[in-house]
Image (cartoon, rainbow, N blue to C red):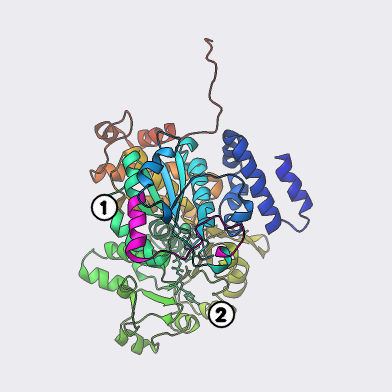
Amino acid sequence: MVDLRRLEVKARDGPSDPYALAKWRILNRLHDRNETMYYKVLVDNIEEYAPIVYTPTVGLVCQNYSGLFRRPRGMYFSAADRGEMMSMVYNWPADQVDMIVVTDGSRILGLGDLGIQGIGIAIGKLDLYVAAAGINPQRILPVMIDVGTNNENVLNHPLYLGLKQHRLDGEEYLSVIDEFMEAVFTRWPNVIVQFEDFQSKWASKLLQRYRNTYRMFNDDIQGTAGVALAGLLGAVRAQGKPTVDFPKQKIVVAGAGSAGIGVLNAARTTMARMLGNNEAAFESARSQFWVVDAMGLITEERKNIDPDALPFARRLDEVNFQGLKEGASLVEVVKTVKPDVLLGLSAVGGLFSEKVLEALKESTSTRPAIFAMSNPTKNAECTPQQAFSIVGDHVVFASGSPFGDVELGNGRVGRCNQGNNMYLFPGVGLGTLLSGARVISDGMLQAAAECLANYINEEEVLKGIIYPSISSIRDITKEVAAAVVREALKEDLAEGYRHMDARQLQKLNHEETLQYVKHNMWSPVYPNLVYRKI
Ligand SMILES: NC(=O)C1=CN([C@@H]2O[C@H](COP(=O)(O)OP(=O)(O)OC[C@H]3O[C@@H](n4cnc5c(N)ncnc54)[C@H](O)[C@@H]3O)[C@@H](O)[C@H]2O)C=CC1
Ligand SMILES: CC(=O)C(=O)O
Ligand SMILES: [Mg+2]
């Protein structure tokens, strides 16, 4: 701690990138020497060090990973290992693995293709699994699947550790991922695999390929969707309205990659459920969204439209009526729609420019909400300062990476919420583990999102607080995991965990389920080496 604090004293201008990286190195060295103490530091100071082991610093770490690398952590499966993965997997020393976070490094945060340097994100996510969900650090496994990289800078770096080739694609690519999945589920049939930061081209295809067979989920699609949904419901409550008013919200989404489409599908499904869950309800819910990507507003006229974005393409009669057109700019869309919510998952820093935010001032909402969810910090669509100063003190604001609250004068504070999937994935993984669910259903993810939404009370939400403080992440995760366990039981997916079979789990009431979850969370305490009778 003295080592870490020394850096703060030296950083006269406050925390800056080089110091963040230095802190990461101190923590990483501690991790190598004494795992229990590393997690003790993390758990006890999570608010301070989540931004170091996770976004934003983990982005910088990944960008510089070849130079920062000292000793390996996790497993690397490469395209050159095809045919060998089934035996390789037995090289891992732990007999039991509960959680794997796997990436192919193709879209790390909003930083693009970083090749095998993306292993840093798998390590960072698993740090949160230990700190927030109490997954035993002996039973986690970060994995990098190295199929090459298309990032020439990374590829030509003299210290690059990965395969020096361009990315595999098509059937060849799929065969590598298939072989990896078969290998890990053969050795550890009960493992849960979280797919992380796969480029959108593959993210949704891989999810559909594996989700009905394996215990897996995609954090960027499903975790982000749940977190955004909880925030969107919070934004409705922050307007002093009941959540059943959600289907009336007009929502502009900037970004139609895997994260944006995941959010759109979850929000539309929730609106449709509130409206009666029939065809008319789905159609009505569709018309609440306007989606803008790199080529502008997506309409039916879009050529070669991504099939995942197709359900959200605006109909021509609608755009003509509104005076919009295919490819309309974000400013035009915001000016015309006057949305209640502006949500960014575009990976474009500053996309919510002064003009866009000025246009949002005309929102028909009493309290417009801005979600600048792209990571890391420099990719945020706008800062909270810009949001509050341009749109007004009444906005509800959330960002993917942490920013400080904003002083509004006269002692008033503009809340900066962190809208990040870290509030959900640890609980989804822990709840799946402790229920023994064979697959991770939409219902389990929905239960997790609703639990997070309900975590915030009325008084807080009216102050513009739509996500809890990260300092309570262990408690939130316990609640989310319990909600996931109960839903898995309800859907008859649970097969139990260790000494608790599904029948025994069924008998637990709400409080007992929470106790069961808490009891199974690992804490950073040294184990007893000598037992003495007292
Ligand atoms: N806060 C959170 O929990 C999460 C945040 N993210 C962030 O979301 C971002 C996007 O992730 P993916 O969807 O996987 O990436 P992606 O690269 O697949 O998608 C980006 C999308 O933004 C669009 N876009 C690019 N320029 C644009 C512009 N000028 N105007 C409007 N749209 C534009 C692209 O056309 C594409 O549809 C990343 O920065 C990532 O860090 C992702 C997951 C979770
Ligand atoms: C938070 C996260 O998963 C991302 O930015 O990709
Ligand atoms: Mg991610």
Q: Which mark is residue 521?
A: none
Range drawn in magenta = 155-180
- As for residue 264 lying within the magenta part, the answer is no
> In this orientation, does residue 484 appear?
no
Using a 10 Å C-alpha cutoff, classify the residue at mark 2 as few (fewer than 14 neighbours), some (14 to 19) or many (20 or more): some
Q: Position of residue 254 (x, y in %)?
A: 46, 73
Tell me which residue sits at (38%, 33%) in the image. Answer: 516
Q: Quadrant of residue 327?
A: bottom left
Q: Which residue is more in the foreground, 338 or 356?
A: 356
Q: Which residue is more in the foreground, 351 or 288?
A: 351
In the rendered image, the vertical position of residue 450 relative to residue 39, given as above or below:
below
Using a 10 Å C-alpha cutoff, classify the residue at mark 1 as few (fewer than 14 neighbours), some (14 to 19) or many (20 or more): few
Of the two numbered discs 1 and 2 on the same chain, state the one appearing first in sequence.
1
Q: Position of residue 285 (x, y in %)?
A: 30, 70
In the rendered structure, which amino acid carries the disc numbered 1?
Asn
Image quadrant holding the N terminus, namely top right
Q: Quadrant of residue 55?
A: bottom right
Q: Is residue 435 left or right of residue 56?
A: left
Q: Which mark is residue 358?
A: 2
Image quadrant holding the C terminus, namely top right
Q: Position of residue 83 (x, y in %)?
A: 35, 50
Tell me which residue sits at (39%, 64%) in the image. Answer: 263
Q: Position of residue 22 (x, y in %)?
A: 69, 50
Q: CA distance from mark 1 to mark 2?
A: 45 Å
Count of numbered labels shown in the rendering:
2
Front label number (1 vs 2): 1
The residue carrying mark 1 is 212
